[in-house]
Image (tube, helix red, strand yellow):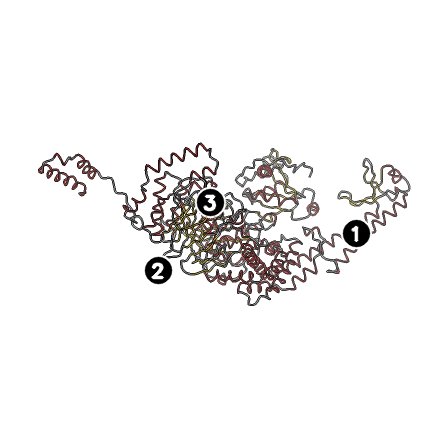
């Protein structure tokens, strides 16, 4: 191909375009369409929603609109290739060996790519006649949710494909139930869950899917469309993929079983979602079936419910700015393998709610904390273990290379070593014993065979050859000897020719065009072109400085060499297939071992973390306790230079109460309120995922739902710090939180005028206390709220201490009972560097304001408001009433001192009459 290409331009402003380019017409009136274009157009028509990577020699070429989209997205040169229907055909291409890199970028931009390969050697096509086109076929669709290549995947994250199915809506008010099936074809996990409309957003936030598939109908549904359009990589598919009637059959077929009964009983909705997933996998992998575990249903309520806003807010997986650095995940990840890191992320995304299950994980961590030598050895084995699950998945779909076989070899060796080491732990907690059993399960013969077969240095691709160890296969050794022998013969021949021609500098060389040839410098060329040497040396090529020849002997030798090399490669490829087949047969046990490696990595990593940062084992109980002594913020304590001040938190129900407590936390800006709130939420998350926690002691009654919101003014990073968002999110909490929930509200009501804000905050606290009855931490700058403690029995005031020292404020970060005496706003402003004149003036103004009104409006509210008219009874605002106002106006107009008793009596009757009008309808 003689096109100048891949001269990369500067990164263009890549615009994301809708995938899908209309297929051009096959022929015009003149009918002048090359056979190749005809083939192209036909294949493209079969994959209208994908960019088509059309293999031509060492390039994947794209044509027409695909070429325009790709050249813009990838910054590669758009060229032309011939004409189609009288028009230039736009074209661009990427070299095959760098295709992954370009695929990665296209996928990241939301494109889907169909990879079309040459299915035969071009020489075969030539044999059929000059005009024959090389057979080509699409061998795979590359979509964001169905990737297997390491280069396309983030090693530390799962890449989920999620199918969403909605149950038929029965009433207009019915928001619907949904089934979700999700799988990671690179690791084989496959799970199912059901949820309602609210839960759907939370589940998607937890899974962070790489791709979502839905039916066309759902995608077009007025209710669902706004949400679905906002999510990245949603692929609407035709109805048949989501057909409930054929779902079970399709699912069973994927797993090659007669019925899916053995997997458990699933609802029709779940089966439909699961079948959609596997059907999509088969379609994108063009019939190949990556090794999936049978689908497992996630038990309802088995995990701590955390909605999207809370996840973002607590910065579990990434910070509000979108980075992993600074997130809880990054702070606690001490795993040494990618699979371990993925499992840790999964556990962090879905903490448990069953105390028994949580304790089982904690037992395992405790065992490793208690056996430091074992923990260290385990981590050594783990660090040596490659990504078994992903290597296995590639081998099964036929995309594996020699290095994937080596990964299996090394992974299985590490698994066996780890199992042996874990056996020395007695008694072993159930989790560790189970993992050890899974590590031992793969047949040791497989690892042994791979160790014997694979060479030390491995090429990336099968077709490069040279990956089978010498001495493993006699036939291969023999063929290789022949090949290498021939090469020695070439060297000998060169020496002989040099001798015969008396040209010392004569060389035998090789290139792809001429094959082997004899080369001499121009000055010796003539000699070989003349008698008698021209009998032996046949002229091939004259270059500026050299002349090239061939000989019959050399041609024969060349054929022999090529044959031997081809045969050797053929033998190697056959051996590869045999080894891969052995691995695939044992896929189940290998997958189990891979999971066990990940589980031990997570456990050992958490043990390391606990030791390194001085975490303790939390006591997990069934009640509503939440008692943290000396708690710390797991991320902040690692980030700050100085010491972190530990703080207690006691939200357990006070004596005999049936609900937990609420803290109203006040204190100046920068005192540490937000930090304190979050650290307690994070401690709950850590405890329930089965980790030790940053505290001196912790007793936690399992939390079923966790909520966290930050007032609008604090929420700048989200880029939409509107009061509306804040209120919508607060509403979600007040509507959903229950007695087992833990709620964190940070400066709610900030985004509006003071009195509005205060009123909303006030009512929210009452509602939490009386109706939600949840455990909660409520940070606020409205000091008025502290007055509520007098009336609400489970409400406590806490404040973060500061000390004033020579007019400056010193933050002690210490949380104590009581209310902040004032907000120190001016002192904080001074710290921030406001000009001295402004600070002095502000102090004056403050003194004036304080002198004017020291009587707290809150005090009056407490005494006057009938409490909790709010809560279960909706507090209707009394309608403005003209009659009442008339009575009041009339009263105001009376002057009792100037009235006779008679006049007074008349006035009284008149007032009664006015009032009666008010009461009467
Ligand atoms: P507030 O919400 O009261 O304005 P923050 O919680 O944002 O205050 O805390 C402000 C800063 O104080 C944090 O960035 C952190 O560096 C520091 N800080 C907070 N709590 C502590 C603590 N317990 N120990 C040490 N430093 C702390
Ligand atoms: Mg704050």
Secondary structure under the numbered disc 2 in the rendered image = loop
Mark 3 residue's CB less than 8 Å from ligand 1: yes
Of the numbered discs 1 and 2, the one sitting upstream in the chain is: 1
Taking 482 as reference, is 444 left or right? left
Location of residue 673 in the rendering, given as x and y in whole percent from the top left corner: 44, 46
- Residue 812 vs residue 68, the one in the foreground: 812
Location of residue 779 in the rendering, given as x and y in whole percent from the top left corner: 41, 46
Secondary structure under the numbered disc 1 in the rendered image = helix
Q: Residue furthest left?
A: 902
Badge 1 crowding class, 10 Å Cα cut-off, few under 14, some 14 to 19, many 20 or more, is: some
- Residue 279 vs residue 682, the one in the foreground: 682
Query: Disc number at residue 656?
Result: 2
Query: Disc number at residue 811?
Result: 3
**Rendered image quadrant of residue 14:** top right
Q: Are marks 3 and 2 in contact (CB under 8 Å)?
A: no
Of the numbered discs 3 and 1, the one sitting upstream in the chain is: 1
Taking 798 as reference, is 379 left or right? right
Q: Is residue 534 visible?
A: yes
Q: Residue furthest top?
A: 837
Disc 1: which residue:
560
Q: Which of label 3 and label 2 is nearer to you?
A: 3
> How far apart in space, not on screen, are marks 3 and 2 (Cα)?
36 Å
């Amino acid at each position: 191909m003689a096109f100048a290409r891949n001269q990369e331009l500067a990164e263009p402003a890549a615009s994301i375009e809708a995938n899908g380019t209309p297929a051009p017409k096959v022929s015009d009136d003149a009918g002048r369409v090359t056979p190749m274009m005809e083939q192209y157009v036909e294949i493209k028509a079969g994959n209208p929603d994908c960019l088509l990577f059309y293999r031509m020699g060492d390039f994947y070429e794209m044509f027409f609109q695909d070429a325009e989209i790709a050249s813009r997205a990838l910054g590669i040169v758009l060229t032309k290739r011939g004409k189609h229907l009288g028009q230039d055909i736009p074209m661009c291409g990427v070299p095959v060996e760098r295709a992954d890199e370009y695929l990665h970028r296209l996928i990241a931009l939301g494109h889907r790519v169909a990879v079309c390969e040459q299915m035969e050697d071009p020489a075969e096509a030539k044999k059929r006649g000059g005009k024959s086109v090389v057979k080509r076929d699409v061998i795979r669709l590359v979509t964001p949710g169905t990737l297997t290549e390491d280069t396309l995947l983030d090693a530390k994250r799962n890449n989920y494909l999620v199918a969403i199915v909605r149950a038929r809506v029965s009433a207009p008010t019915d928001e619907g139930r949904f089934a979700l099936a999700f799988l990671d074809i690179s690791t084989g996990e496959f799970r199912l869950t059901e949820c309602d409309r609210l839960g759907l957003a939370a589940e998607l936030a937890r899974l962070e899917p790489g791709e979502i598939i839905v039916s066309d109908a759902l995608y077009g549904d007025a209710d669902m469309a706004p949400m679905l359009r906002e999510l990245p990589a949603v692929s609407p598919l035709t109805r048949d993929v989501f057909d409930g009637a054929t779902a079970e059959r399709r699912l069973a077929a994927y797993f090659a079983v007669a019925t899916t009964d053995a997997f458990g009983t699933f609802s029709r909705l779940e089966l439909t979602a699961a079948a959609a997933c596997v059907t999509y996998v088969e379609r994108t992998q063009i019939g190949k079936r990556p090794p999936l575990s049978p689908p497992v249903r996630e038990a309802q309520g088995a995990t701590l419910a955390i909605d999207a806003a809370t996840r973002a807010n607590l910065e579990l997986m990434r910070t509000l700015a979108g980075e992993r650095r600074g997130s809880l995940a990054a702070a606690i990840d001490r795993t040494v393998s990618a699979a371990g890191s993925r499992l840790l992320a999964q556990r962090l995304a879905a903490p448990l709610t069953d105390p028994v299950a949580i304790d089982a994980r904690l037992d395992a961590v405790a065992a490793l904390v208690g056996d430091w030598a074992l923990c260290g050895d385990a981590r050594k084995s783990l660090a040596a273990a490659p990504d078994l699950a992903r290597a296995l998945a590639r081998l099964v779909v036929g995309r594996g290379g020699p290095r994937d076989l080596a990964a299996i070899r090394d992974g299985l060796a590490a698994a066996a070593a780890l199992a042996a080491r874990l056996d020395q732990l007695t008694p072993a907690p159930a989790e560790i014993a189970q993992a050890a059993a899974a590590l031992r399960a793969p047949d040791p013969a497989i690892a042994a065979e791979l160790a014997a077969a694979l060479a030390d240095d491995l090429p990336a691709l099968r077709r490069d050859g040279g990956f089978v160890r010498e001495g493993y296969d006699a036939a291969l050794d023999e063929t290789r000897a022949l090949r290498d022998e021939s090469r020695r013969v070439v060297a000998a021949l060169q020496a002989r020719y040099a001798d015969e021609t008396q040209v010392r500098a004569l060389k035998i060389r090789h290139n792809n065009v001429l094959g082997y040839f004899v080369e001499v410098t121009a000055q010796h060329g003539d000699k070989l072109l003349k008698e008698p040497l021209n009998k032996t040396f046949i002229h091939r090529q004259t270059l500026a400085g050299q002349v090239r020849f061939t000989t019959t002997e050399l041609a024969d030798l060349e054929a022999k060499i090529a044959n031997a090399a081809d045969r050797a490669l053929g033998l190697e490829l056959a051996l590869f297939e045999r080894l891969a087949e052995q691995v695939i047969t044992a896929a189940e046990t290998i997958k189990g071992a891979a999971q066990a490696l990940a589980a031990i990595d997570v456990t050992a990593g958490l043990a390391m973390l606990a030791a390194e940062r001085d975490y303790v084992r939390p006591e997990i109980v069934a009640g509503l306790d939440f008692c943290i002594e000396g708690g710390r913020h797991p991320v902040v304590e690692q980030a700050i230079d100085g010491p972190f001040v530990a703080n207690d938190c006691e939200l357990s129900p006070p004596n005999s109460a049936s609900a937990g407590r609420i803290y109203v936390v006040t204190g100046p800006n920068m005192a540490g309120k937000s930090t304190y709130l979050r650290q307690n939420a994070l401690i709950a998350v850590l405890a329930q995922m089965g980790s030790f926690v940053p505290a001196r002691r912790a007793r936690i009654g399992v939390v079923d739902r966790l909520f966290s919101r930050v007032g609008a003014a604090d929420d700048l990073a989200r880029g939409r710090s509107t009061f509306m968002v804040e209120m919508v999110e607060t509403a979600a909490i007040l509507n959903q939180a229950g007695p087992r929930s833990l709620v964190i509200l940070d400066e709610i009501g900030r985004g509006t005028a003071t009195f509005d804000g205060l009123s909303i905050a006030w009512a929210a606290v009452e509602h939490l206390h009386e109706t939600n009855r949840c455990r909660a931490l409520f940070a606020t700058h409205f000091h008025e709220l502290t007055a509520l403690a007098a009336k609400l029995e489970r409400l406590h005031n806490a404040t973060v201490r500061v000390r004033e020292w020579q007019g400056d404020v010193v933050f002690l970060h210490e949380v104590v009972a009581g209310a902040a005496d004032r907000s120190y706003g001016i002192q904080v402003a001074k710290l921030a560097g406001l000009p001295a004149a402004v600070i002095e003036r502000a102090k004056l103004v403050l003194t004036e304001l304080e002198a004017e009104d020291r009587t707290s409006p809150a005090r009056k509210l407490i005494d006057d408001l009938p409490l909790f008219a709010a809560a279960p009874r909706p507090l209707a605002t009394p309608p403005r009433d003209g009659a009442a106002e008339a009575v009041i106006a009339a009263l105001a107009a009376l002057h009792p001192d100037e009235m006779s008793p008679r006049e007074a009596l008349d006035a009284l009757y008149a007032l009664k009459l006015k009032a009666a009008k008010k009461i009467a309808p």
